[in-house]
Each structure stands twice: as structure tokens, then as C-alpha cells.
């Protein structure tokens, strides 16, 4: 009996570790495009970095080298060495662009309790890099256990390609801390690599994804975390379903056909089944959710009950032959009024902002809509100082900030039909007028600019590479120096409502590359957070020309962030940027006549910082050019002076030669030179005679050659 009892006890204990259970899954198909943190139904939270920059994009999670956010989702229970023995995770990943040589990690397990402010103990870190690849265009994945890990710890032997989807599977031994990596496995015995750094007993309570410089751009879906290999990988994988955006319907209306797609690797697409649920069956019974289409292309039609108004959350589930599922969730709002999107607004202190247009509508009661507005910062903008006027669909806001106040407030505008309502919010920045903060003409001797004889400071790259030549800053793409000039005595923080304008003159002698690079930016205190980055790039430009563009935080530029003007070498252009310190939004002008001139706004995610300095930077791809007359201020007029061009005309009067130019050209001086190959221009000493609207200077019976110009 003792032997039988011992045998039974041994079997019972051996079944405890590795019990099969899926503790976290997310197909990433049910979220609208945008920040995944805070999205409807999202379990993901921000651990660190710029909140809201990890994006759900086209039924996947987009992880990008140009943004910085670490997110995590909790497992349904804690996985430990005593109850499970190991934790497994899998997801599908497709790299859109390559990681860098050293790369970095982009996914990991997280120990219990260590998220948010207590972030730490990232285990089973999956690295992406091009370290030790044999050919251009290839990359590798590897795994490491700790903060001291690198791509060299346990690289997977197979080199991978961009735009190919791979199934990545990892395991952490919760007794030893050893971590293992597979790519496209069908069983646990398939080829793998293991980092055998011993860490002792571990626990897993979260899974995380991380954005950081060097990791490339990837799209991820079908995340699964479990306690056995079969929970997350094997012969059968889950199906997929594309996302459907939430929408509004009028009462007694119908959605018509809404297209979406489904798919599965193992089950024929025609054998996949669809089902639906509704959280408000009085408004929307499930039999009023009707599927159509065939194959991978399906449709759904939503028809609320006539006479009913309200909101319902609809979940569509696709199931394969092994009962694996994927879902997408969206909200249907019936009979609610609508309100237009209102962009962020700015106004100076002690100034009333009027004419902010708002469009509202309602299918049932268009003439009875009530529009109200509130402010979150009533010290800056009291609710009583918000006025809504107009009727019908067209309403207008007038905002009167409190006297002598500056800062930022969130204004929420709500439209109600008496039963339901809709809202839209925008940020109002009330900015102080502080005048010119930096006025840098670069009138230094020809020498390195950051050599302790100037206020410029080297903060990265090779010290002393950047030089001043002829009163201009010379930036060269073969250099690496990044250097800054502190904004003193005032250091703008995000809550101050400050808007910074910068301008400088550029003249390119060598074109940037197609990819280009950024060469100027704002910098924070002490760390290396850069904002309002100005780029040069030949992307989308005709041969021999280039463009300038701007990004909020991104280290690369897309065509959406490039100014539409094509530029040429050996021409001087004034570049003007606007950076809102509170909202981190950036815009750029080229040779503007006013702030309403053509500009381009940065389209990447924004994250604000306390601004300490303005900086210039050199790197591969920026080209070769000079910079002159840097100005930083708090109004457009502080930094941008519109220079009017005037014509100098010449004509003969008997034996004399007469030069004439408009009297409107105030500040211009007539100069003469006998040889265009020299810089020996001198002022013409003759006082002009004014006739009508022109100045006249007469050269009596001149001989030889002479060249004339007007100079301001």
C-alpha cells in the first residue's frame, strides 16, 4: 500500500507544473487605429515612455524605432515556479524596416508588481538586430534574460527577411530563469536557442512590448501567453479578423454593408464560422446583425430596432475547426447628435479668441440642439468666459482667457438633443509674449563652435567637429557632433503655455540623401529628448533638388512631414518652425510672408518635454550646408522678418548713366564694384535725388566697367 500510495503521490505532483492554460491573448484586431493604451476594450497600460505612442494599426500592433513607449497587459493569473514551472508566449511579427546593427529588444515577460513607476525585471527579452548577418536586407532575432543582455547572448541561427510574417515563441523556465526562443516551430522539440544566464525562481504577471531606437518597425498580432507550449503554439493557430471602426446611425436607419476580412492558416476560409453579440439587445438584437460575403471577404449589416435610440457594443467572433477564435469589437451609437472635430487653438495672453467654428447635426432634432462648453483649467479660462453663438448646424465659440494668465486648458464642447449627447475636445494654449530668447548671428572667428569660447555646448558626437566659416555655421553629413545653446534665463515647461518660434537661414551646397536626416531640434535638460526636429531629404523631390520637413519626436521623416516646396542648392532659404511646448506640436515654413503662409505640420506622435536648449546636429544623409541668423522667440514676428525684393534699373541719359530704385526700399544702400570676382563692394557716396516714388543717382560720363547692387 505504501508503494501504491507513493506512486499516486508522485503522479499528482508531476501534474502541477505545466498545467495547460491560456492566461493572455490578444489578436490586436479589435482596436481602432491609434493609441492602444486607452482604446475601447484594451487591457494595455503604459509602463514608461511617451504615453499614447504605441499604436494599433490596421489590425495589428505597430512597434516603431521612431517612438518610445513600453506597454504591458496583465495575465489572468500569476505564473510561478511552484504552480507552472514555465511561461510561454507567442506572436506573429512582420518587420517593415530593418533594425540597426546593435538593435534592441522589443518584447518581454514582466515579473509581478513591476510595471509603471516600479518597472523592472524584463525577462525573456526578444532582440532584433542586423548583428552578424551575411547579406544586406537580413536581420536576426535573439533572446536574453536580463538588463545586461544583448543580441549576442543567444542569436537564432536563421537570418530573417523584412515583409515576411514569422511566428515567434519564447519560454522562461520559472525555476532557473533560462529563456528559450523558437521561430515558426510546430513542436517544442524544434530547433531553438537558450540564454542560460541563471536568475533563480521567477514569476510572470504581465507581457510587454517596447519601442526604442534601433529596433526597426514591425507589425505584431495574435499574442498568446500560457503555461505550456501547446497553449501558444503548435500545429493549429487562431484565425484572424480585421477591425471595424465604431460609428453612429440615425434612428430608424441601417448601416448598409460594412466590409471586413477573415482568415486562418489551417482551416479553409469557407469553413470558418461567424457569430455576434450585442450588449444592448433592446436596441440591437443579435438577429439584426446580419453577415454576408464569402471566402475571406465578409460583410456585416447593422439594423437597430425602429424607434429605439442608444448605444450597443458589438463583438464579432470568427471560429476555426479547432474552436480557436478571434474577435473584433466596435460601438454602434443610434440617434445621437454629431459634432465636428475641433483642432487645437492658440492665443496670446490678454487676447480674446473668437470665431472657433463648430458644426453640429442630428437626424431627428436638428433644430433643437443645445451646445455647451467647459474648461479643465478655470483659472486660465473660466467656464463663464466661453461663449457659444449661432444656430442650427453652425455654431461659433469665443474664448476669453483670464487677465494676465498663460497656460493650457482642455476645452470640451458638448452637443445634446435632450436624450443623447456627443462631445469633442481640444487644447487651448494661451501663450505669453516673452520676446526674443535667442539671437545668434554666428559672428565668431573661424574655429570650432563648441570649443568653450562660445555659449554653444557639445552634448554628443565628436567634440570640436563643427566649425564657423565666414560668420556662418557649417554642417557636414560626415560629422557626428550634436551641440546646443541654452535658452536663458527662461526654461519653458509644458504647463507654461509657451509657444516657441525659431528661424534660421540655410544654404545647401551638397544635396541630402533620399532618406535624409534631422539637423536641428529642441533639447530637454540633461537627457537626450529631442523635439521639433527639422529634416533635410531628397525624398519625393526631382533630381538635383531637395525638401525640408519636420517631425515632433520621430528620428525619420515621411513624405507627410515634408514641406511641398522643392529647393535647390546654392540658394538661401529662411526656415521658420513653431513648437508648442505644451502639446509638442510642430510646424514648418519656408520663406514665409506671414504665419498664414504655406506650412507643413508634423504628423508623428507628440510627447512634451521641458525645453532647455536649441540644438544643431550632423549625421549621415543631411547633406552639406551653412546656417546663419538663428533666432528663437515666442511670436512669429520675433523671428521672421519678411524681406521685400526691389529692382534696380539703369538707363542712359546723354553721356551719363542713371540708376534708379523705389523709395519704398528703406534701409537699402547703393553699392559699386569694378570686378565681380572680388568682394570689394563700396557704398556709392552720392545722395540720391527723389523724383516721385523713385531714388535717382547719376554717374556723369563714366568710363570702364562698374557693377551696382542694392544691399539691405
Image (spheres, helix red, strand yellow):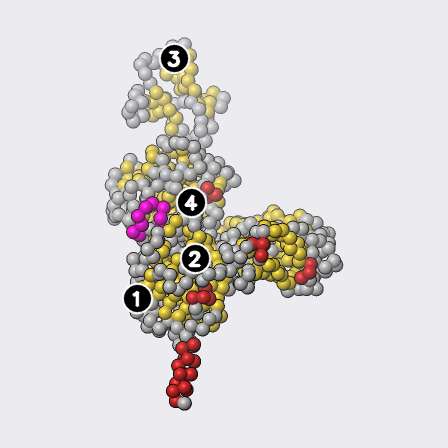
Write the residue at 39% across / 70% down.
Answer: 86
Image quadrant holding the N terminus, namely bottom left
Compare marks 4 and 1 and give the one earlier in the sequence: 1
The reply to whether the magenta stretch includes residue 139 is yes
- The answer to whether the residue labelled 1 contacts the one labelled 3, judged by CB atoms less than 8 Å apart, is no
Q: Earlier in the sequence, mark 2 or mark 4?
A: 2
Q: CA distance from mark 2 to mark 4?
A: 30 Å
- 326 to the left or right of 421: left
Q: Dot 3, how many residues are within 10 Å of its Cα: few (below 14), some (14-19), or many (20+)?
A: few
- Looking at marks 3 and 4 on the same chain, the residue that comes earlier in the sequence is marked by 4
Q: Are the residues tagged 3 and 4 within 8 Å (C-beta)?
A: no
Which residue position holds label 2?
Answer: 167
The disc placed on residue 635 is: none
Distance of label 3 from label 2 (alpha carbons): 86 Å
- The mark that comes first in sequence, 3 or 2, is 2
Badge 2: how crowded within 10 Å, few (<14), some, or many (20+)? Answer: some
* Residue stretch rendered in magenta on the structure: 131-140
Q: Are marks 3 and 2 in contact (CB under 8 Å)?
A: no
Does residue 684 sit above or below 656 in this rendering?
below
Real-space Cα separation, disc 4 to disc 1, in angstroms: 40 Å
Does residue 279 appear to the left or right of 223 in the view shown? right
Mark in the foreground, 1 or 3: 1
Seen from the viewer's position, the closer of residues 39 and 546 is 39
Q: For numbered disc 3, what is the local secondary structure?
A: strand
Q: Which is in the foreground here, disc 3 or disc 2?
A: 2
Instruction: Name the residue that disc number 4 marks.
Output: 557
Residue beneath disc 1:
196
Residue occupied by mark 3? 656
Identified at 42% across, 45% down, the residue is 557
- Determine crowd level at label 4: few under 14, some 14-19, many 20+ residues with C-alpha closer than 10 A: many
Name the N-terminal-most of marks 2 and 1: 2
Amino acid at each position: 500500500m505504501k508503494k501504491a500510495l507513493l506512486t499516486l503521490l508522485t503522479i499528482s505532483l508531476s501534474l502541477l507544473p505545466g498545467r495547460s492554460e491560456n492566461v493572455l491573448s490578444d489578436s490586436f484586431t479589435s482596436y481602432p487605429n491609434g493609441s492602444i493604451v486607452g482604446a475601447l476594450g484594451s487591457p494595455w497600460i503604459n509602463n514608461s515612455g511617451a504615453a499614447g505612442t504605441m499604436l494599433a494599426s490596421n489590425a495589428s500592433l505597430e512597434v516603431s524605432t521612431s517612438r518610445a513607449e513600453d506597454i504591458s497587459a496583465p495575465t489572468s493569473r500569476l505564473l510561478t515556479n511552484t504552480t507552472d514551472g514555465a511561461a510561454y508566449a507567442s506572436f506573429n511579427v512582420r518587420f517593415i524596416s530593418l533594425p540597426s546593427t546593435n538593435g534592441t529588444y522589443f518584447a518581454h515577460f514582466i515579473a509581478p508588481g513591476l510595471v509603471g513607476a516600479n518597472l523592472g525585471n524584463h525577462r525573456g527579452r526578444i532582440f532584433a538586430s542586423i548583428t552578424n548577418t551575411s547579406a544586406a536586407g537580413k536581420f536576426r532575432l535573439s533572446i536574453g534574460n536580463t538588463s545586461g543582455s544583448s543580441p549576442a547572448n543567444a542569436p537564432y541561427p536563421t537570418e530573417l527577411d523584412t515583409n515576411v510574417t514569422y511566428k515567434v515563441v519564447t519560454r522562461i523556465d520559472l525555476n532557473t530563469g533560462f529563456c528559450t526562443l523558437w521561430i515558426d516551430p510546430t513542436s517544442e522539440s524544434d530547433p531553438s536557442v537558450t540564454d542560460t544566464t541563471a536568475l533563480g525562481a521567477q514569476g510572470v504577471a504581465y507581457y510587454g512590448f517596447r519601442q526604442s531606437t534601433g529596433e526597426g518597425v514591425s507589425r505584431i498580432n495574435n499574442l498568446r501567453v500560457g503555461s505550456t507550449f501547446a497553449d501558444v503554439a503548435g500545429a493549429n493557430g487562431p484565425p484572424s479578423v480585421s477591425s471595424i471602426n465604431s460609428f453612429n446611425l440615425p434612428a430608424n436607419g441601417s448601416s448598409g454593408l460594412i466590409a471586413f476580412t477573415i482568415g486562418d492558416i489551417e482551416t479553409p476560409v469557407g469553413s470558418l464560422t461567424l457569430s455576434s453579440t450585442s450588449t444592448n439587445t433592446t436596441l440591437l438584437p443579435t438577429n439584426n446583425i446580419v453577415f454576408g460575403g464569402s471566402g475571406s471577404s465578409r460583410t456585416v449589416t447593422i439594423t437597430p430596432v425602429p424607434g429605439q435610440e442608444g448605444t450597443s457594443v458589438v463583438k464579432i467572433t470568427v471560429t476555426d475547426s479547432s474552436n480557436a477564435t478571434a474577435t473584433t469589437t466596435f460601438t454602434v451609437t443610434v440617434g445621437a447628435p454629431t459634432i465636428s472635430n475641433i483642432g487645437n487653438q492658440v492665443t496670446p495672453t490678454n487676447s480674446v479668441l473668437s470665431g472657433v467654428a463648430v458644426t453640429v447635426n442630428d437626424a431627428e432634432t436638428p433644430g433643437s440642439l443645445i451646445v455647451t462648453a467647459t474648461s479643465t483649467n478655470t483659472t486660465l479660462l473660466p467656464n463663464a468666459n466661453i461663449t457659444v453663438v449661432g444656430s442650427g448646424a453652425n455654431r461659433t465659440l469665443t474664448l476669453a482667457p483670464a487677465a494676465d494668465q498663460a497656460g493650457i486648458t482642455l476645452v470640451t464642447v458638448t452637443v445634446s438633443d435632450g436624450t443623447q449627447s456627443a462631445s469633442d475636445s481640444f487644447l487651448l494654449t494661451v501663450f505669453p509674449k516673452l520676446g526674443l530668447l535667442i539671437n545668434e548671428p554666428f559672428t565668431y572667428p573661424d574655429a570650432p563652435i563648441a570649443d568653450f569660447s562660445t555659449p554653444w555646448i557639445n552634448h554628443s558626437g565628436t567634440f570640436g567637429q563643427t566649425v564657423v566659416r565666414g560668420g556662418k555655421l557649417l554642417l557636414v553629413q560626415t560629422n557626428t557632433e550634436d551641440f546646443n545653446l541654452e535658452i536663458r534665463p527662461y526654461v519653458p515647461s509644458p504647463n507654461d503655455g509657451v509657444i516657441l518660434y525659431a528661424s534660421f537661414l540655410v544654404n545647401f551646397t551638397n544635396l541630402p540623401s533620399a532618406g535624409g536626416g534631422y539637423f536641428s531640434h529642441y533639447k530637454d535638460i540633461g537627457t537626450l529628448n529631442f523635439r521639433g526636429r527639422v529634416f533635410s531629404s531628397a525624398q519625393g523631390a526631382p533630381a538635383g533638388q531637395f525638401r525640408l520637413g519636420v517631425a515632433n519626436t520621430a528620428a525619420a521623416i515621411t513624405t507627410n512631414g515634408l514641406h511641398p516646396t522643392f529647393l535647390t542648392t546654392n540658394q538661401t532659404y529662411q526656415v521658420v518652425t513653431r513648437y508648442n511646448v505644451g502639446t509638442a506640436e510642430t510646424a514648418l515654413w519656408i520663406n514665409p510672408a506671414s504665419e498664414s503662409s504655406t506650412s507643413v505640420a508634423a504628423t508623428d506622435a507628440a510627447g512634451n518635454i521641458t525645453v532647455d536648449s536649441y540644438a544643431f546636429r550632423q549625421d549621415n544623409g543631411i547633406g552639406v550646408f551653412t546656417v546663419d541668423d538663428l533666432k528663437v522667440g515666442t511670436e512669429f514676428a520675433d523671428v521672421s522678418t519678411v524681406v521685400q525684393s526691389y529692382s534696380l534699373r539703369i538707363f542712359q541719359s546723354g553721356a551719363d548713366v542713371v540708376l534708379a530704385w523705389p523709395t519704398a526700399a528703406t534701409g537699402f544702400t547703393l553699392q559699386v564694384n569694378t570686378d565681380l570676382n572680388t568682394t570689394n563692394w563700396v557704398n556709392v557716396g552720392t545722395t540720391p535725388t527723389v523724383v516721385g516714388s523713385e531714388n535717382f543717382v547719376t554717374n556723369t560720363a563714366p568710363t570702364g566697367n562698374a557693377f551696382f547692387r542694392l544691399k539691405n
